[in-house]
Amino acid sequence: MENILKKIYMGALLPLLVGSIIFFYWFYERNWFAEDFNIYIYAMFTIAGFIVCAIITLILCAVFVLKNRTEWKKIIVPILIIGFTLPVIHLYETTVKTFSQKAFVRIINDTDKEVGRFWSDDFQMWGDTKRSDDYVISFYPVYKYDWHKTRGNSYNIPHTTNEVFVDLITDRDSMVTYTLPKIEKGECKTIRLSELTKARKVNTNLTTYGREILLQTK
């Protein structure tokens, strides 16, 4: 009977442990390295495994109780674990859906300039993750839809994405502003500032701050 009990606990715990490891690995990669780990494939197999394990575990619980009616309390914990796994799956799913609307960008500052800030016309980012000259910023890209070009019931509505900028401080205490490449919802991207600053032109549409020189890439 102890052997059956071990299988019951293993069947109840294994999907929760595997699913949690996959989720937190995805969460870590996305937040700290802006890497797009494809969690959907792993999640599909993990949920399928949970269903199979839950069915087998419940059958084993029934067998255990039939053979050991006085020790039914021993299967309460694994049954609670199976029930607890369901809201955890929902929590993970909600988090993934929320993050699919955000962009994660890793910015490596391999220039001799200091990063001032990351910003857009719609927001200013304060919560970036910084590791020396390695930044990871996350934000919700803002879309502007061209409703006049919508055809029939098509969901593919043409849109433009509001630009995101980075301010670099030069050795002369002036501010140079560059435009980051186009970033869409759910996208993960790595940008090196040395590559960003190679090609540039004066942007006359931006506001000048005192001695700031505002430039953007082509």
Image (cartoon, helix red, strand yellow):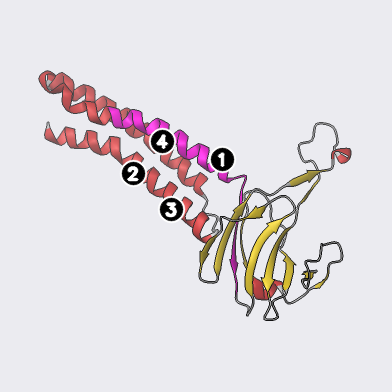
Residue at x-position 10% and y-position 19%: 70
Instruction: Give neighbour class at mark 2: few <14, some 14-19, many 20+ (Cα, 10 Å).
Output: few
Do tag 1 and tag 3 residues touch (Cβ < 8 Å)?
no
Q: Which kind of residue does numbered mark 1 sit on?
A: Lys
45 sits to left or right of 59: right
**Mark closer to the chain start, 2 or 1:** 2
Magenta-drawn stretch contains 97:
yes
Magenta stretch, main secondary structure, is helix
Q: CA distance from mark 1 to mark 4?
A: 14 Å
Instruction: Give neighbour class at mark 1: few <14, some 14-19, many 20+ (Cα, 10 Å).
Output: few
Which of the 4 image quarters holds residue 191? bottom right
**Residue at numbered disc 2:** 17
Q: CA distance from mark 4 to mark 3?
A: 16 Å
Q: Nearer the viewer, residue 184 or 54?
A: 184
Name the residue at the front extreme: 210
Q: Position of residue 167 (x, y in %)?
A: 69, 67
Q: Quick one: SS at disc 2? A: helix
Q: Which kind of residue does numbered mark 4 sit on?
A: Val
Q: CA distance from mark 1 to mark 3?
A: 16 Å
Q: Quick one: SS at disc 4? A: helix
Q: Quick one: SS at disc 3? A: helix
Q: Position of residue 47 (x, y in %)?
A: 43, 37
Q: Position of residue 173 (x, y in %)?
A: 69, 77
Which of the 4 image quarters holds residue 74? top left
- Residue extent of the magenta highlight: 80-109
Residue at x-position 12% and y-position 34%: 2
**Residue at numbered disc 1:** 97
- In the rendered structure, find residue 88 and report the number of the disc placed on it: 4
- In the rendered structure, find residue 25 and report the number of the disc placed on it: 3
